[in-house]
Structure formats: C-alpha cells, structure tokens
Amino acid sequence: MTRLPGLTSTFALILLLGSAAAQAAIPVYGYKVVRTYPHDTGAYTEGLFYKDGYLYESTGQAGTSTVRKVELQSGETVQRYNVPSQYFGEGIVDWKDRLVQLTWQTQTGFVYDLASFKLQRTFTYPGEGWALTRDEHHLYMSDGSAVLRILDSESLASTGSILVTAEGSPVTNLNELEWIKGEIYANVWLTNRIARIDPANGHVVGWIDLDGLFDINQLPDPGNDVLNGIAYDAAHDRLFVTGKRWPTLFEIKLVKQPTP
C-alpha cells in the first residue's frame, strides 16, 4: 500500500481538533422540581433575590412597578414600596443594609434602606437597566446586551465590563442575574434558558434548559410573560426560578444532560 505524504499527521490533527471540540462543548443541564411555592400573578418579575428567609422582588410596568419583601412559603407580600409611576422597575440587589434598584429606560436607579424600603438616594447610568447581582466586592448589571457592567458597590459607577460569549459568539438579551458559587446565572430573555457565566472571562460554561417547567400559554400575555427570576439560598443550597406573572415559584435541582 502506498502511503500519501502527510496523511498520518493530517489524520492526527483531525482527531486532535475533534477531541478539543468535544471537550469545549458547553454542558447542558436539565432540572428536577424539588418543591413549588405560590407566586403573585400580578408580579411582573424583573428582579429577585433571597435573603434571611424572604424573597425580595422588583416588578415592572410603568405605573405599577414595586419593590416587595415576600414570604417564601405563602407567597404573601409582607412589605411593599410603590415606585413612582413614571418609572419601569427593573433589577434589584442588596448591598450591606441597602437595596439597589434599576429602572428600564429612564437611566435612573434607586437606593433604599433594606429594612424600611425608605428611599435614600438616586443614581444615574447610560443606556437601559435590566438586572443586578453581586459578589462580595462588586455589583454586576445587565442592560439587554451581551455585556455585563461591573459597578463599584458604593458609588455605583461603572468600573469595567464583561463580554459574555458562548463558543466564541456573543450572548445577547442577558436579563435577570444571580451570583451562585462563583458564577453568574443569567436568564436569556424570551427563552427558557439560563446561562452559567464565568465572570473571569465571560465564557458561558453551562446552559440550564427549563423547557417544560411552566406553560406560559395559560397566561394573559404569553409573548411577554416569560421565564425571568433567579434566586439562591446559599445557606441551604436552594435554587429558585419563576417568571413574569407566573402563579408558581419553583425550587429546582440541576440535572446534567448527556453530552451529544
């Protein structure tokens, strides 16, 4: 048999590239529902986090936007602040004894006392505001693009940014955010997917596929009443998800899917 020059090395290169591609494939996680809790169908969920046994929720829509403290078990609102009618409420996060909230297109954010919801001050930012989360040092903000802004936790000024990519392509429509075990989880607006993002480089290191979790066609506006809302109870390792005007908050466990 006559061997063609370079065939062995070419074949080896193909095998090597194929192996690298397989290793680079982004893992996909499904879910198992652990428990369900009631959720207010009047809550157009824009921001969500869990703290000391309660959910804190920001709801949208101009004229009806709110900040709420919600009892997990019953879904009852135990504390509420009505955002001025000219603002469309967006993401929220806690920082020390404060609560920070974004608004959608008015380039204005609010800082409240976490205990009383009393407004302490406002701040401004360019562009749209979508969501907030934090680690121990910084706040992270989404604006609907593929870029997450890094904010100074005290001044709330932008100090940097993270371009989020999956296999080299930008991931747009990043919405509600949650910091979980060193990663940023982000709802991808108008999809049933959550991206797991490495904040060090912006790479999506996992997808969470929540298809089948809830049928939005039973809601008043299925085009907009989509999955949005991630909260994490770090003390008990509980992950919660919900959506805009959904009647249910789901506690889920992630289940890794087989690699294709």
Image (tube, rainbow, N blue to C red):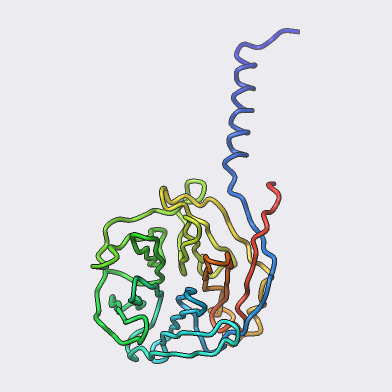
Residue 156 on image: x %, y %: 27, 68
Residue 257 on image: x %, y %: 69, 53
- On the picture, is 48 further left or further right than 38? left
- On the picture, is 181 further left or further right than 260? left
- On the picture, is 94 further left or further right than 11? left
Residue nearest the observer in this picture, 57 or 171: 57
Residue 160 on image: x %, y %: 29, 56
What's the residue at 47%, 73% (across, down)? 49
What's the residue at 66%, 76% (across, down)? 214
Q: Is residue 135 above or below residue 68?
A: above
What's the residue at 56%, 76% (across, down)? 226
Q: Is residue 36 above or below residue 26?
A: below
To which quarter of the image does residue 2 belong? Answer: top right
Residue nearest the observer in this picture, 174 or 35: 35
Residue nearest the observer in this picture, 144 or 116: 116
Q: Is residue 72 above or below residue 79?
A: above
In the rendered image, the residue lying farthest to the right is 1
For the N terminus, the image quarter is top right
To which quarter of the image does residue 100 belong? Answer: bottom left
In the rendered image, the residue lying farthest to the top is 2
Residue 202 on image: x %, y %: 43, 51
Q: How many numbered discs, if any?
A: 0
What's the residue at 62%, 33% (across, down)? 19
